Amino acid sequence: MRRGTRSHAPTRELRQEHRRFLRRLALLEKRLDQAEQGEIPMGRLRAMARRQARDLENHLRVEEEDLFPRLAHTDLGHPGGGIGTLLSEHALLRKYLNEFLSALDAGAAAPAGEAVAPARSFLWLIRDHIDKEDTVYFPRMDALLARSA
Ligand SMILES: [Fe+2]
Ligand SMILES: [Fe+2]
């Protein structure tokens, strides 16, 4: 999906997606808490987690395949630059999410550390990642792209 020729900031749609993710992550966390307390089966999380994983993958791919390559020539794309940090976090997000989904697929029942631990790591990291993109990297990227437009 190309997001190039827009009059608004290039990262605007991604930041709007972040808002939606944060709302849905709060619900996922609530269900996780309930499953951990044995109030609902871990399996009830599966459909919700799979949907969120699919939407997140689409979001990460737009960043990786559209946004980041447009900034590869800037200092953000240099070794040790911000894009490398964000890509490392994307890899970790996918790892935690896959571990969580695999544990749910394996039929983990509450209390199930093998499902809960990666889910908690995922929730912590994605919120930190979104905050970092919203407050540090995306404003910088928008400024760089506006300059080169
Ligand atoms: Fe990202
Ligand atoms: Fe993002």
Image (spheres, helix red, strand yellow):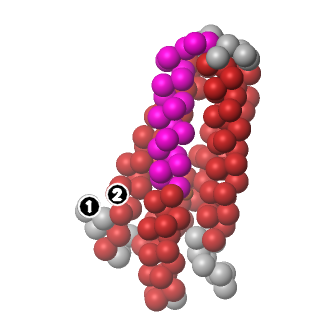
Q: Nearer the viewer, residue 34 or 80?
A: 34
Tell me the magenta residue range.
110-130
Residue 69 visible, this orientation: no
The answer to whether residue 12 is above or below residue 36 is: below
| Residue at (46, 89) in percent of width and height | 147
| Residue at (59, 75) in percent of width and height | 10
In the image, farthest residue toward the left:
79
- In this figure, which residue is indicated by the disc labeled 1? 80
Residue 117 in the image: state x and y as whole percent.
48, 25
* Residue type of the residue flagged with mark 2: Gly
The answer to whether residue 56 is above or below residue 133 is: above
Instruction: Judge left or right: residue 98 versus residue 53.
Output: left
Residue 96 in the image: state x and y as whole percent.
48, 33
Q: Nearer the viewer, residue 96 or 32?
A: 32
The kind of secondary structure the magenta stretch mainly shows is: helix
Task: Let me know if residue 142 is in the magenta part.
Answer: no
